[in-house]
Image (cartoon, rainbow, N blue to C red):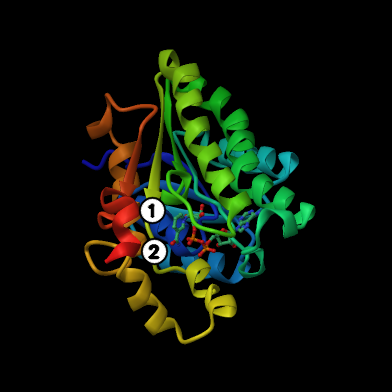
């Protein structure tokens, strides 16, 4: 039987892109998935699709940069289904107009990126951990990025948020190891989602040519698909990864293996 039959899973930013892939993957395994997102249309589509899956998806509109809304998400999972087993802190933004050197970076944009990409991970954890403790354990999977390990110009807030997510993953793993709560991270390479599609706005050109160009930075010669991240998230959240905590996994077609040589060939 699936590790996730009837498990209660929260996915932030779970309506589309990588989060949509994660929500679908858990629901296909029989989980009850609470998708917390701002995108009503994608949320409604996901809920409709889930009617043919073994599990269920419920959509809750929430801005997880705000404490009260994170609290409401967790309270909803508890009141509807009785607790929380898995938290996927997946939400993340990298606005197309945010590619700027640090001295030109608007302070409000810095705050918003850090609040969504990092503070929400803390807030969701803060409210989920007591519920996980009541159930004897749980897992928290954070979507970080290869940009938490290596970077590029113009992404100071995003890179800082992802480095913070990796550091937070280690920290939380230590804090909750004795409570049987494992905390892990995935670092996607470039993945085919609406977030990267928005990059066309500042890079110009057409999306398909850009995908081919980005693919060249990955030794496997292509960018990834949301399901390829979701599959690893499922593994990390499962009992098959029962002795893993405080660690990250790069799911990047070999990008980090190649590292700084990537641009030189
Ligand atoms: N796509 C990539 O190439 C890539 C690479 C590395 C890491 N990541 C990370 O993966 C995660 C998912 O990225 P994606 O590419 O699927 O992005 P996406 O923009 O396609 O999806 C993100 C989802 O988050 C939701 N969201 C945004 N702000 C929110 C908020 N404040 N509260 C609740 N929901 C909110 C959006 O509505 C959307 O459904 C992010 O953490 C991102 O940084 C993506």
Q: Is mark 1 within 8 Å of ligand 1?
A: yes
Residue under label 2: 191
* One can see residue 208 in this view: yes
Residue projecting furthest to the front: 264
For the point 63% across and 50% down, the residue is 157
For the point 60% across and 37% down, the residue is 124
Above or below residue 63? Residue 202 is: below
> Which residue is more in the foreground, 20 or 208?
208
Q: Quadrant of residue 220?
A: bottom left
Q: Which secondary structure, mark 1?
A: strand
Above or below residue 252? Residue 215 is: below
Quadrant, the N terminus: top left
Above or below residue 11? Residue 169 is: above
Above or below residue 255? Residue 74 is: above
Contact, mark 1 vs mark 2 (Cβ under 8 Å): yes
Q: Which secondary structure, mark 2?
A: loop
Quadrant, the C terminus: bottom left
For the point 25% across and 54% down, the residue is 254
Residue 18 is marked as none
Residue under label 1: 188
Q: Is mark 2 within 8 Å of ligand 1?
A: yes
For the point 38% across and 83% down, the residue is 209
């Amino acid at each position: 039987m699936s590790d996730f039959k009837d498990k209660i899973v929260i996915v932030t930013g779970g309506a589309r892109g990588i989060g949509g892939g994660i929500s679908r993957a858990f629901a296909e395994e029989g989980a009850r998935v609470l998708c917390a997102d701002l995108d009503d249309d994608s949320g409604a589509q996901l809920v409709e699709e889930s009617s043919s899956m073994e599990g269920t998806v419920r959509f809750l509109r929430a801005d997880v940069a705000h404490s009260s809304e994170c609290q409401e998400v967790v309270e909803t999972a508890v009141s509807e289904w009785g607790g929380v087993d898995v938290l996927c802190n997946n939400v993340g933004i990298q606005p197309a107009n945010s590619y700027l050197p640090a001295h030109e970076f608007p302070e409000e944009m810095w705050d918003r990126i850090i609040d969504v990409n990092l503070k929400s991970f803390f807030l969701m954890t803060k409210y989920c951990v007591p519920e996980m403790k009541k159930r004897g354990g749980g897992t928290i999977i954070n979507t970080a990025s290869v940009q938490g390990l290596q970077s590029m110009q113009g992404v100071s807030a995003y890179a800082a948020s992802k480095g913070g997510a990796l550091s937070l993953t280690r920290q939380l793993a230590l804090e909750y190891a004795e409570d049987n709560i494992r905390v892990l991270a995935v670092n996607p390479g470039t993945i085919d989602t609406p977030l990267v599609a928005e990059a066309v706005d500042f890079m110009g050109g057409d999306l398909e040519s850009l995908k081919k160009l980005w693919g060249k930075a990955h030794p496997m010669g292509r960018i990834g698909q949301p399901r390829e991240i979701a599959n690893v998230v499922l593994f990390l959240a499962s009992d098959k990864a029962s002795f893993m905590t405080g660690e990250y996994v790069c799911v990047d077609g070999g990008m980090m293996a190649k590292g700084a040589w990537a641009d030189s060939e």
